[in-house]
Structure formats: structure tokens, C-alpha cells
Amino acid sequence: MNHVMPTPAQPLKIGTRGSPLALAQAHETRDRLAAAFQLPPEAFEIVVIKTTGDNRALIDADKPLKELGGKGLFTKEIEEAMLAGAIDIAVHSMKDMPVLQPAGLVLDCYLPREDVRDAFVSLGHAALADLPQGATVGSSSLRRRAQLRARRPDLNLVEFRGNVQTRMKKLGDGVADATFLAMAGLRRLGMAEVAKSPIAPEDMLPAVAQGAIGIERRAADARAANMLAAIHDHETGLRLAAERAFLAGLDGSCETPIAGLAELSGNSLRLRGEILRPDGSEVLADDITVPVAEGAQAGAEMAARLRERAGPGFFDWTGLA
């Protein structure tokens, strides 16, 4: 099927948030599309859209994400711009994406996945184990906070958000002794050295879809569908199908500590999942290996098993932010 390719006069408009990491991801998307179709960079226009989650007052307030509106904070305005035709595609960090897209939008293109691990970041300590009793750790991630409470109940946990640069400044200002960031983001920013030590998934299972970039489009936009198909990474798609089915079967919001990771080996897919009480007092985990084609089904079944084991009230908020 022939579709009119974008040109400098009529560029393909790529919507993104304005943080350094979001822009790095948008540029990677543009460069991959330009290479796939032998187009000049000028055939694409990167359109920065300010989302509710980018509101400086919200970042500085350091309130739990749950109280501010959850995952939609980072996507709502971008998706509205796409539905209105102001942009053609949107680039997202997949761990920020709700499991359901608004009517009329499709998310079926993923770039090759980066490092999935969490990174321990501190100006004065080399690893999590080196933190002294009662040290202060900053994180806005419910998952990371619950995992830390389970492993190091002695730590003092504080709300901590903002882009990499903001968080590094907060560490420098003494707001916390350490924090955690995604290795993927640091690598995409060329700042991998900021990580004092990456944490193996065996020690800290990452967020569902961590390290993956997804590109959203209008369902009816055949040109965008055709172009995005050329840069879609099939392996990442298989892994995220399992992980996001697991997330969807549990909750899929920012209000619950959930971790999940799918990995491929030949024709097999290994899925690890974990749910935690917000206070870290209980961790339920599951681990299954299935044929690749059964990944999404395995994710849904794992979610059902963990839900049953957890029983009612497992995720109830107990006032522990």
C-alpha cells in the first residue's frame, strides 16, 4: 500500500514530553524512522507537549503519584493532541503507560528494549547494602519503596520525583542519601556513570515494561501504521505482551506495588511477577516459563494466581506513602 511519505514541507509530527529523557527518546524514534525510509531529519517535527505531570509545582510538592492522578498524568495531553490531529505519533516510556489506550488510539510499536535494571544512585555510597541504618532514600515509585521496605525496613523513605537532573540536585542538597533511577534512562541520556551500581532483577524486580519505548498512533492512520511497522522490535513486543497482560490482570495503575519481567530464550518466554503490600510486610512472587506464543496468556494467568493468593485488601493503602 502506498502512503505519501512525510517531507520537510509536510513533516510527520512526533509528540513528546519536554524532559531531556523524553526528548532523547523522541530523537531516537525520529532517527530510526529516517533511517528506515531514507528520509532527512527535517521530514519530522518533534512537538513538545506539556503534560500535567510536568507541572513544576507538582514535582516540587513531592506528593505520591496516586494523589496526583496516576499514570495518566504523563499521557493525557499528548493523547488529546493526537486525537485532535495536532500530532501524528507519540513517544512514551512504556512503564508510564496505562494498560488501556483511549478509543481511537493504538500502541503496537516498540523500539528495542534497553537495560531493564534499576540503578542505585548516591553521592556517598556505592551500593544499597552500604547505606547505614536509618539512611534516607528518596523515591516516588511505590514498587521501589515497597521492595526497599521488605529488604531494609530500617531505611527512612521520602517522596522524591523529577527528571534525572532534578533528582541529582536533590541528592546534592542533602534531601536524601540515595535514590533509584532506571538504567535505561541513564543510558539513553549518556549518563550511565551516574549509577553507582545496577541492581540485578533477582534482587529488585523492575517495573513492568521498564526500559521500553512505545510509539502510539491513531488507529485509522494507515501511513503511521505502515511507518511504525518498519521500526517495531518484535522481541520487545512479545515481552511486553506478557508483562502488560500481567499488569492488566492485577490493576495497572500507579497505586499498587507491582513488578514484572519477561525474557526470551529461543522459543521460550520466562515471566517473573511480584506484588507487594505497600508497607513491604508481604511479597508474593511467581515465576513461569512457557512457549513464546503463550506469553500474554501466561501473564493473565499469573495475575489471577497472585490475586487469589493475595486475597482482598492486599494493596490497601495504610497511610504509608
Image (cartoon, rainbow, N blue to C red):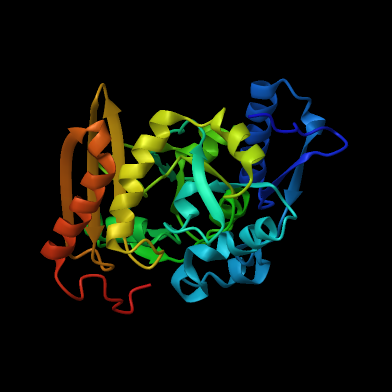
| Residue 66 in the image: above or below residue 134 | below
Rendered location of residue 118, percent (x, y):
39, 43
Question: Is 227 on the left or on the right of 137, as rendered?
Answer: right
Rendered location of residue 265, percent (x, y):
26, 24
Question: Is 198 on the left or on the right of 220, as rendered?
Answer: left
| Residue 36 in the image: above or below residue 143 | above
Residue 204 vs residue 264, the one in the foreground: 264
Q: Residue 239: name its quadrant.
A: top left
Rendered location of residue 173, percent (x, y):
58, 58
Residue 40 vs residue 132, the one in the foreground: 40
Residue 86 seen by the camera: yes
Q: Residue at x 16, y 48 (%)?
A: 286
| Residue 148 in the image: above or below residue 196 | below
Q: Residue 305: name its quadrant.
A: bottom left
Q: Residue at x 24, y 46 (%)?
A: 297
Q: Residue at x 42, y 42 (%)?
A: 119
| Residue 30 in the image: above or below residue 308 | above
Residue farthest to the bottom? 319
